């Protein structure tokens, strides 16, 4: 097979980033689009050279096309489950946005449906492919800080005059727990942070969370400030702090948010100093060990590169016959992190995994 032929279900704001690597790789081609907002889908089609007769408002019509190898499911969280089952039933391979589902039971059904249909199920996660994260992981795997003992993740949200223009409808479902599955910072964006915890430290064995709320407007509550603590096997720990500061002005081209990660090992410490934006004018990766600080700046730091690398990894895996990152099973593990935080905040107790 000379090309990976891809169809998109959902052409909203995030699809711009999902398309980048497909458009830039001669081994791949976007061949069909679907969105209930047909005008939006047609606009994307003109940008991506997708013929108008291959742009649909109902995904069943797109799934009926025989020449689609992979379907990118870019829908609100509560729609992932059914769209994945229907895509598997149509015999198409699947890349579904994170978090993959609203419950572990749904995730299990999605995994089983893909297996029964003999198709690939990838859960799309980009943060583990962010170049500074990749560099930090390579340094840790090379033994630079010894054995990782703790991980601390700080996520700052604020405002920005240069942030993405996100439609009100997209904001609305993220603030609706029935459609989002939790909240936009701890459950939705938190998936990236739980994925980082999983990526660097493995699967947690217990989670304890405090999730507050900040009123943004009538019936609009943001799940912040929040602290989520993790206990990993082997006497290792981690934490995520998510905070919204309404007067914090951020430098970003995407969401008004930035992140920092600190990983402490038995003989050193690594910092990843940015994520969506650029709060600090310092190198993106900093390593301290043996009384010496080393910095690493020889890498792209735009958030879009995490999407490019994630998609490129899948294209490489597709042609090599290798499994994707994240597999459906991996995505279920990260989902368990996120759901445990919600349960702990409700119960006031640690949740064992």
Image: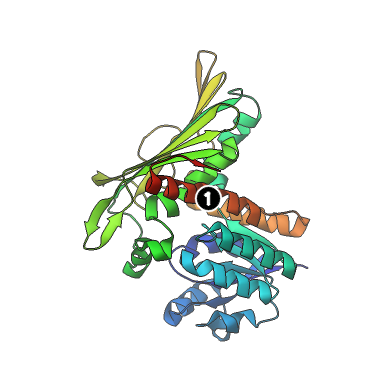
Percent x, y of residue 214: 26, 50
Residue 292, image x and y in percent? 51, 16
Can residue 296 be seen here? The reply is no
Vertical placement of 185 versus 268: above or below?
below
- For image coordinates 43% across by 45% down, the residue present is 344
Q: What element carries label 1?
A: helix
Q: Residue 69's quadrant in the figure?
A: bottom right
Residue at left offset 58%, top offset 23%: 145
- Quadrant where the C terminus lies? top right
Q: Which colour scheme appears in the figure?
A: rainbow
Where residue 298 appears, as percent x and y from the top left, is 54, 36
Q: Which quadrant of the view contains residue 5? A: bottom right
Q: Quadrant of residue 90?
A: bottom right
Q: Which residue is drawn at 70% across and 74% down?
A: 91
> How many residues crowd around disc 1 within 10 Å: few (fewer than 14), some, or many (20 or more)?
many
Residue at the far bottom in the pictured view: 53
Is residue 285 or residue 119 the one in the foreground?
119
Q: In which quarter of the image is the N terminus?
A: bottom right
Residue 174 appears anywhere in the view: yes
x then y, percent, for residue 302: 47, 48
Decide which of 162, 331 is in the foreground and name it.
331
Report which residue position mark 1 lands on.
Answer: 305
Q: Left or right: where does residue 17 sit relative to residue 137?
A: left
């Amino acid at each position: 097979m000379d090309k990976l032929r891809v169809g998109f279900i959902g052409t909203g704001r995030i699809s711009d980033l999902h398309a980048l690597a497909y458009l830039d790789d001669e081994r791949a081609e976007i061949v069909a689009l679907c969105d209930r907002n047909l005008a939006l889908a047609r606009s994307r089609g003109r940008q991506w050279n997708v013929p108008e007769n291959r742009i649909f408002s109902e995904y069943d019509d797109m799934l009926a096309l025989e020449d689609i190898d992979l379907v990118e499911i870019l829908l609100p969280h509560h729609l992932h489950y059914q769209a994945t089952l229907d895509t598997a039933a149509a015999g198409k391979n699947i890349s579904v946005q994170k978090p993959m589902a609203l419950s572990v039971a749904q995730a299990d059904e999605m995994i089983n449906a893909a297996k029964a249909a003999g198709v690939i199920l990838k859960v799309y996660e980009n943060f583990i492919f962010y170049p500074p994260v990749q560099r930090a992981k390579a340094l840790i795997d090379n033994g630079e800080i010894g054995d990782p003992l703790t991980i601390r993740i700080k996520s700052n949200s604020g405002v920005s005059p240069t942030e993405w223009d996100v439609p009100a409808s997209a904001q609305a479902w993220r603030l609706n727990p029935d459609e989002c599955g939790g909240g936009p910072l701890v459950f939705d964006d938190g998936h990236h942070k739980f994925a980082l915890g999983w990526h660097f430290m493995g699967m947690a064995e217990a989670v304890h969370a405090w999730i507050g709320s900040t009123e943004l407007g009538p019936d609009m509550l943001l799940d912040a400030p929040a602290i989520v603590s993790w206990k990993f096997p082997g006497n290792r720990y981690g934490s995520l702090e998510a905070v919204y500061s309404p007067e914090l002005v951020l430098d970003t081209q995407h969401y008004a948010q930035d992140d920092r990660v600190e990983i402490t090992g038995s003989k050193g410490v690594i910092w990843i100093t940015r994520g969506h934006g650029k709060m600090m004018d310092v190198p993106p990766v900093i390593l301290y060990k043996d009384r010496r600080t080393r910095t690493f700046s020889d890498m792209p730091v735009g958030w879009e590169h995490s999407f490019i690398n994630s998609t490129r990894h899948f294209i490489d895996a597709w042609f090599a016959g290798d499994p994707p990152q994240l597999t459906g099973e991996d995505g279920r593990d990260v989902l368990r992190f996120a759901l445990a935080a919600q349960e702990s905040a409700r119960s006031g107790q640690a949740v064992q995994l």
